[in-house]
Image (cartoon, rainbow, N blue to C red):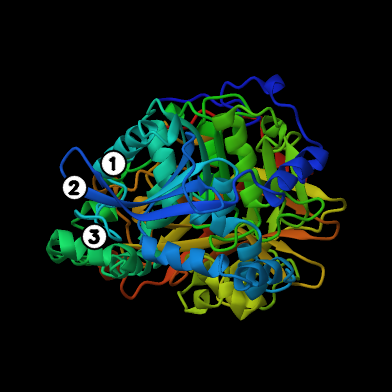
Amino acid sequence: MTLDLDYDGFAGADRGSARLQPNADGGETARAWREAVDGRQPYPRVHIDRSVTLTMSDGTRLRATVVRPANLLGQPVRTPFPAVLNINPYNRAVIDSIDHTLHAPAIGRVVRTASASLPLGDGLSRIGRTFGTGLWDVFGINRNLVRSGYTQVIVDVRGTGSSHGRWEILSPREQQDSVEVIDWLSRQPWCDGNVGMTGWSYSAINSLQAAGLRPPALKAVFAVEGGEDIVRDVYLTGGMPSAFIPLWLALVNGLKWLPNPATGVADVLRGDAYLWLRDRLKSPASEMPSLIWGFLTARDDRIFDDPYFDERNPKVEQIECPTFTVGGWHDLFGRSATRVYAKLQMAPGRKQMLVADGYHLDPGCDHGAPGRPPRLDVLERAWFDKWLKGIDNDVDGYGPVTMHQQGGSWSCGDAFPRTGVTPRRLFLTEEPSGTADHARHDGSLRPSPASRRRTLPITPDLRGFVSRDIAQVTAGAAIVLGEKFSTDARFQEAGGLSFTSEPVAAPTQVSGQMNLRLNVSTTAHEGIWAVTVNDVAPDGSSRVLTNGALTASNRALDPSRCTYTDDGVLLDAVHYLSRIRRLPVPADEPVRIDVDLVPTDVVLATGHRLRVDVYAASLPRYLTIVPDLIKARGRRQRLVLDPTKPSYLTFQADGDLGADPVPVVRLAAAR
């Protein structure tokens, strides 16, 4: 399916339908949303049933928690309410423990208050602040939401937690479970027929999947850091598996063996414990054997962009219900934050996009202060109040594109990329910039190609273990280790080739997609490339803005999904990443590769520079499958600066950066 997008990033949308708020904090309107959350709720307590059983059409039993508004005696209120559904694989026993901690007498209030007041100056504080800014209410049991007049249902994905069956990551069967659960919810006496879905990470993907199947009762989605292209985001970026995947699979497979105390005794009495154990023994480590086999042999669909993944990616363009998506520029699913918004076929207001300058583990950490977005639980409540209850609270006038500009501040607008930016191009040249003596090569970004042919050797090293790449692949956990893991790339740059622009004379915005064309060679039959684009401050510190990677054999492009300028310059590359589309890599013969970079939004302050760093690898962000390692053994990689086959960065900016303007881009690339 082809989706035509206009330059502003809307998909056939009516721009006039959204009533824009001037500030990211939403002003007086958003203060009313917060007061509705923090004020007295109509129902004093909640009633929690943690041992509900749902039987799917194939006979598999899923286990769920149902949370309902209750009176002072703890008895559930008989009135039917909208239902908010969360389906995740992380075991309700874990969610229960978080719920008990956050709502324990005295302790819960102390945790929330203390975490919300932590400074934003270091990584540990950023992650800790999420307990006071609404993230864990979106992830787990949101008692305050329920007390305001909602029923919440949390379900263990089949094969995880207390649910029976075999875990099949985001599979069509799992998606069918979501549709059946939504239908079941809508027919319960305590539900008024309106269902919303919410969640963080896996649950957000699950929500987008379900919305793409259009179950009639699903009326709204609030998705925090979900993905629309699992392969390119995290599973096989540029043809290279991420270290995150085996770690994550080990986590979920470990949690699925953890019995839930809330259901364990009852399961033993009913005989369900035997069925649960039988299913676990049938699949003790779901997906791990396939991943390992594919990594060792490249003979498994998990190592290629194959139908295995196609059937798991949400059909975002088919979603009809109002959808609010939250992302992060350095999130595991960084590519998806903006692409989900672009693919949604509805007017701004019914669709909303909020993207922070953060990671997977810290969404919402800086929310709730003047000039910043409302807390995540406040946004979630306002979103569901509007679309599930019909309350005219103007949440559809917020945003619709709310972004924390890297190097700048939060703002609301009507477009991504930002209006006013145009495509531009800077070439990698050998001339020293005088700013990167610490790198293996100090080159320049200039408006014209290199004047003569020059070959720059580059070899892999392990400096990626101390970089923003390791922060990204650990979902942000590594930021607690200091600035080398988040705000200063000079240590990593000592192993790379750097190319830096002239300083900008005025604040300059860079917004949207980017592509890096490289002319490269290798002495072996495979090349492994990793790149970053950085903001270089006058003091020399170098902050990674976006990144990408590609193995040379995966350089084949899918033209139907790429984005080009009017004269054919590639702005956003989409590679096939399939077994049959891999290309040979001739030894000692230059080939041209296009490295797609995560879309971003940046302002370069006066005196700052743009930098491109080129590496021969970045472990463990990008792993190499064993067959490719064999092909690359003993390799010596080279970046070839050739005036007849130039290497250059194509991007979009509102200042020249010394860059040649490129004709205005037309976006026409999506499944």
2 or 3: tag closer to the N-terminus: 2
Q: Residue furthest front?
A: 73
Dot 1, crowdedness within 10 Å: few (<14), some or many (≥20)? many
Residue in view at x 70 percent, y 32 percent: 393
1 or 2: tag closer to the N-terminus: 2
Quadrant of the snapshot with the N terminus? top left
Pointers 1 and 2 in contact (CB under 8 A)?
yes
The answer to which image quadrant residue 31 occupies is: top right
The answer to which image quadrant residue 307 occupies is: top left
- Residue underneath mark 1: 177
Structural distance between the alpha carbons of marks 3 and 1 = 19 Å
Depth check: 585 or 580 in front? 580
Image label count? 3
Residue type at mark 2: give it. Thr
Structural distance between the alpha carbons of marks 2 and 3 = 19 Å
Relative to 615, 399 lies left or right: right
The answer to which image quadrant residue 9 occupies is: top right
- Residue underneath mark 2: 60
Would residue 510 be seen by someone viewing this image from the given angle? no
Relative to 201, 499 lies left or right: right
Residue in view at x 55 percent, y 74 percent: 478
Residue type at mark 1: give it. Asp
Of tags 2 and 3, which is closer to the observer? 2
Quadrant of the snapshot with the C terminus? top left
Residue type at mark 3: give it. Glu
Image coords of residue 332 (percent x, y): 49, 57
Q: Which mark is residue 287?
A: 3
Dot 2, crowdedness within 10 Å: few (<14), some or many (≥20)? some
3 or 1: tag closer to the N-terminus: 1
Numbered disc 2: secondary structure:
loop
Numbered disc 1: secondary structure:
helix
